[in-house]
Image (cartoon, rainbow, N blue to C red):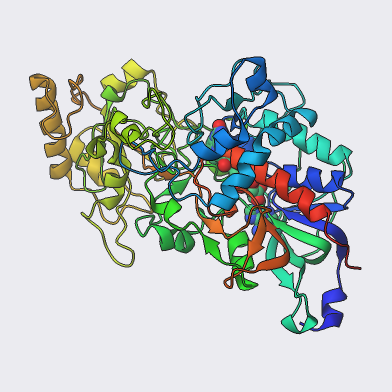
Amino acid sequence: MAQAAMDNWDLETDVIVIGSGAAGLPAAIRAVEGGASVLVVEANYDVGGHAILSGGHMALGGGTSAQKKYNIPDSPDTVFSDLTDWSIVQPNGTPDFRYNDRAIMRAFADHCAMAFEFLLANGVEFADKAPDNQGASTTGNSAPRENHAIWTKGAGLESPNAANGTSAIRPLEASARKKGVKFLLNYKMTHIIREPAAAGASRVIGITAQYNPHVMPGSSTPLKSFRSEGNIDSTQANMRLGARKAVIVATGGSTSHLEFRRMFDPRLTPEVQVGGEPYSYQDASGELAALAVGAALWGLNHQAMENGATMRAQRALATKYNYTTWKLESPIFPLVKSTGFNVKDWQDLILVNQVGRRFYDETKGDPPHGNNGHQVTPYTPNDHRNTEKLGYTPHKYNFIHAALAMNEYCEPPDYAAGPQWAIFDADAVTREGWKVVPPYVDPEGYFFSANTLGELAAAIKNEYQAKPMRGEILQATVDRYNSFVDSGVDADFAKPAPKYKIQRPPFYAAWGTVIVHDTRSGLRINGRCQVVDMAGQVIPGLYCAGESAGGFNQHGMGRCVTQGYICGADAAKLPRHE
Ligand SMILES: Cc1cc2nc3c(=O)[nH]c(=O)nc-3n(C[C@H](O)[C@H](O)[C@H](O)COP(=O)(O)OP(=O)(O)OC[C@H]3O[C@@H](n4cnc5c(N)ncnc54)[C@H](O)[C@@H]3O)c2cc1C
C-alpha cells in the first residue's frame, strides 16, 4: 500500500480496540489509564458482546481481595500449577489444561488477581460471598475462584436480556467513557492495515471499518446504545482508522463462522447455532484480518477437545436461538422471534434426531468438567491418581457429540447431522405449564404440532432438516419409548426409570439442537498478548485478547478480562508513531 494512502485516515488515535466485550473494555480502560488516546470500534449497536449476556460468573483467583476476605489461600504460582496440570481430565477423557501454552498461562497467573482488583476499581460489584467453583469451569482445583456479578433491574445497568453479565460490563463501559475512551459503534472492522515490509519495522498502523447499522424487522430506526457519552457520530459507509501505537483484536472468536469453525471440527455444520447470537457474533473477522497480515493460529486442538463447556445442550426449546432464554423486552426480540420455554423435568419429553430416532438419555445435561464438583478430593497437583478419582465414563458424557456424529439423512454438500427435536404430548404441556403459542414458540420452522405422530413428522419443515422425518420411524420410536415406561427400563440409553408415556394428542415437536458456545482456539499470542506470526516473531503493534486468542483452554470471561488488562497497558507503553 502506498504511503500516501496509508496516511489518509478518517480518524486517528493511539490505540484501536476492536470489540467491546469482556476483553475489549478492560483493554480500552488500561490503555487510556496508560496515557493513550483510545478508540473502541464495535460492530454492534451497543457494547458488551457475549459478556453482557453472560451469567456474570467470573473465574479470577491467585490471591484476590475476595479470597483473602474469606480466608481462601491462593497465589499466582498455584494458579499456574493448576492451569497447567496434565493430570486433570473430564469424565469423558478430555484433558482440560494439558495443552495450555505455558507462557500464556504464566502471564494469566501473574495478572489475574490484579485483573480482579481492576474490575472492582472500575465499578464492578460481585456478590459479597466466598468465591466458589459454580458457574464457569476449568478454574483449577486448588482454590475456589469463581466470583458472581448479579444484575439488578433499574440500577442504570440496562441489559439486552436481563443478564447478570450486564453488571460486569455496564460499569466498565461507564468507566471507560468517563476516562475518555471514544466509541465507534455500528462499525465492523474489515481489514487490519500493516505497513509494507519495505517500510522497515512493518508495524500494524490501522484498520478499515464498514458502517453496519442495526435495524430490527418492522422498524426503520436503527437501534441506539444505552449510553452515548464519547460515541463518535458517523454514518460514513467506510472508515480508515489510524493507530499511532497499536491495534488490539478483541473480537470474541470464530464460532459464528461456519467454514472457520469447521476447520477445527467438521461436524459443526450449519444447524449448530451459537450461544450469544443474535446479539453479537463471533464471526472470525479478527482472526481472518490478522491472518491476512501474517499472524499464526495457536492451540488448535483446544477447539475440538470435546470440552464440557464448548458444546452445550439447549437451554430453551421451540426457538432458534435456544441457548439463552430471550426476554420479550429485549431490544433485539424482533430478530429472536420467540422466547422458547425451559424444561423442568427432562422426563417430560424425548429428543430425536432429524430421522426421528432417540440418541441419548435426555436427563443428562452438559458434560461436567474435571474440576467442578470436587470429584478430585483430595487434589494433589500433577499426581496421576487425580485421573482415577474422576471416574472415567466416556459413554455417559458424549451425548452432544453423539448428536453431532449421527449419519442418518446426512446429505451433500456438508453431510450435516441435522436438527434435534424434542417430542412430547399434551400431558407434558400441562405438567410443565408451557405456553405453546407465539411469542413463546416460533411456528416458522422451530415448533410444530399435530394430532398424530405421523402428521407431526410430516409437518416438520425447517431450513436445516435435510428431508421430511418419516412418520413410521417417529411412531416406532415413541412406541418403543412408551414400552420403556411400562418396563421401567430404558434398554437403549439407560434414562433412569422413564416416567411418562407420549400418548395424548396433540403431539409436539420443538427445536432442541445442541449449540456451540466457546471459541477455544485463535491467534497466536505471547505472554504480553502480542500477536505472533508464522515465523514466531511478534507483529509490531498488533495484540489479541479474549476468545480470539489461542493457547488457553478456559471457558469464559476470566481469561478475557485478564488478557485485556495485560495488553491495554502494554499497548499504551509503545512509542507513538506520528
Ligand atoms: C449466554 C452466555 C452466557 C455466558 N455466561 C458466562 C459466565 O457466566 N461466565 C463466564 O466466564 N463466561 C460466560 N460466557 C462466555 C463469555 O461471555 C465470553 O467468554 C466472553 O464474553 C468473551 O469475551 P470476548 O471479549 O472475547 O468476546 P465478546 O464478549 O463476545 O466481545 C466481542 C465483541 O467484538 C465485537 N466484534 C466482533 N467482530 C467485530 C468486528 N469485525 N468489528 C468490530 N467489532 C467486532 C462483537 O460484536 C462483540 O461485541 C457466556 C456466554 C454466553 C453467550
- Towards the viewer: 421 or 491: 491
Please count the marks in the image.
0
Location of residue 377 (image quadrant): top left
Image: 49 above or below 117: below
> In the image shown, does 256 or 419 lie closer to the viewer?
256
* Residue in front for this viewpoint, 546 or 389: 389
Q: Is residue 331 visible?
A: no
Q: Quadrant of residue 61?
A: top right
Q: Is residue 488 left or right of residue 327?
A: left
Quarter of image, ligand 1: top right
Left-right relation of 319 to 452: right
Residue 275 position, x and y percent, is: 50, 42
Q: Is residue 153 above or below residue 532?
A: above
Q: Position of residue 466 (x, y in %)?
A: 29, 56
Quadrant where the C terminus is found in the figure: bottom right
Q: Position of residue 358 (x, y in %)?
A: 21, 39
Residue that appears at 41% across and 30% down: 380
Residue 304 vertical position relative to residue 51 in the rendered view, above or below: below
Name the residue nearer the viewer: 327 or 6. Answer: 6
State the residue at coordinates (87%, 41%).
Answer: 229
Outermost right residue: 578
User: Is residue 35 shown to the viewer in this render?
Assistant: yes
Asked if 519 appears above or below 483 in the picture, the reply is below
Point out the image quarter for the N terminus: bottom right
- Measuring 78% from the left and 57% from the top, which residue is drawn there? 16
Q: Position of residue 64 (x, y in %)?
A: 67, 27
